[in-house]
Image (cartoon, rainbow, N blue to C red):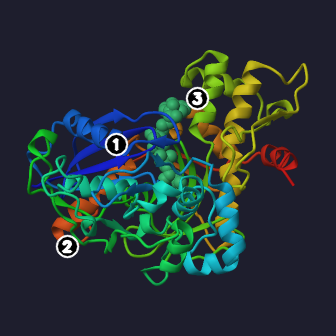
Amino acid sequence: MPLVAGVDSSTQSCKVVVRDAESGELVRSGRAAHPAGTEVDPQHWWDALRAALDDAGGLADVAAISVAGQQHGMVVLDADGRVIRPALLWNDTRSAAAASALIDEFGAEALASRTGSVPVASFTATKLRWLRDAEPSAAERVAAVALPHDWLTWRLRGFGPTGESPLGPVLEELVTDRSDASGTSYWNPATGDYDRELLLAALGHDAVLPRVLGPLESAGTTAAAPSDGVPAGIVVGPGAGDNAGAARGLGAGPGDAIISIGTSGTVFAVTPAPSADGTGAVAGFADASGVYLPLIATLNAARILDSIAALLGVDHAELGDLALTAPAGADGLVLQPYFEGERTPNLPDATATLFGMTIASTTRPGLARAAIEGMLCGLADGLDALRAVGVRPARALLIGGAALNPAVQRIAAEVFDVPIAVPTPGEYVADGAALQAAAVLAGAWPTWPLALETELAPATVPLIRSQYAARRPA
Ligand SMILES: Nc1ncnc2c1ncn2[C@@H]1O[C@H](COP(=O)(O)OP(=O)(O)O)[C@@H](O)[C@H]1O
Ligand SMILES: O=C(CO)[C@@H](O)[C@H](O)COP(=O)(O)O
């Protein structure tokens, strides 16, 4: 059976899986780290992708590949296909004022109905507006705007700057997919069209935008330079935003809400109809199969635990063990975890606050538990926001780096009011990309099995969310 590869070029690292196209069996995998920071030269992603492919044993026996990646990042190219400045990532909040300006100019409801979402600083259009105002000479040179997965797909297919790529800077060969296009704020998921007026308003002039491929449309084949270590002639799928990739990798269907706890915290579902939430809480994205993916995202998730574990001088497992020795509600200790500002709620300049400190509550176990509870309460608010746009979750599938932590799983059952299902540890974004690669080869979506490692009935402790809600900013 042919092999297929799937890539997750995420915020902190690049992960690759190689699977059997028909059965979905994992054959091998690889990964490589990305640099820290909220602006990154895309060359690092290309270097990490090639290192991760190498770590995964290369592509010599692989028939098709798809790239999923972190959403929204602003990759601006000049007419020679060169990256003009480091990409601003989804978690860079410097364009918060630009987001407000676009909302003032067009109206929140109008933007929701034209693009599915009310933009916050994460969205690409706000970053282009920031560029127009803060770095006008760079903005004037922008000939094309791409997203991380679009740019990597273009490079895999052999396009890039003159002298650094076999096929050169053919900007019109940039492609994307519906799911990632829907995070730009200048594409309409309901119609499938770019909204050029919004692009013009953001950037100040027109530019080449990637052609939006259908879910099973091939982007072409690989043609990277031999020195890049990528063999020519491998079929390339359209790729996807990482959350849409995860939905495919999990085979999410009606009744499934997905909670991903990686660098971002996201809660999303696959729905037959588009959403357009004028309050801005829910982003009305498209999915990777032809339908829709209403989603809420927080800027603060797994790294809350990284930070508190470092503070306590423990590893992740010890942090979890500590947390489970404290009572539910941590004796009133509440961590409002806006370490990096926040996106949902939209508080880009916020910082984190620890409430309820008494001599009795301020303990190492209490702080460990408050960190996990605070992280999960933000996501539980997100699940409520999804319900408000009509999602009816029957279970929550918990994925992402921090979902590996048994204490996170246990406390999730106390915070959420739906059963928690934890799939076998894996790279579900990369799996979704691999499934898409297999689907492009076969012309139809294969069905790969999903194994669950843990299922937890709700053991809801209402106190956890009520004391968190009491501290919520007005
Ligand atoms: N057992 C664990 N408990 C808590 N956090 C963890 C655990 N394992 C990994 N992480 C954290 O998960 C994050 C990586 O998750 P991942 O889903 O790969 O993120 P991303 O896709 O955003 O790069 C890191 O911040 C890492 O420290
Ligand atoms: O901004 C969003 C979704 O809107 C984030 O989900 C990014 O797509 C980054 O994802 P991770 O790297 O944390 O998986």
**Which residue is labeled 1 in the image?**
45
Residue 97 appears in the rendering: yes
Residue at image x 11%, y 55%? Answer: 2
Looking at the picture, which amino acid does disc 1 mark?
Trp
Whole-percent x, y for residue 332 in the image: 86, 34
Whole-percent x, y for residue 446 in the image: 25, 65
Relative to residue 364, is residue 431 drawn left or right?
A: left
Residue at image x 55%, y 57%? Answer: 127
**Which residue is labeled 3 in the image?**
306
Residue 66 appears in the rendering: no
Question: Cβ(mark 3) to ligand 1 < 8 Å?
Answer: yes
What is the quadrant of the N terminus in the image?
A: bottom left
What is the quadrant of the C terminus in the image?
A: bottom right
* Residue 443, numbered circle: 2
Q: Secondary structure at mark 1?
A: helix
Whole-percent x, y for residue 369 in the image: 71, 31
Q: Secondary structure at mark 2?
A: loop
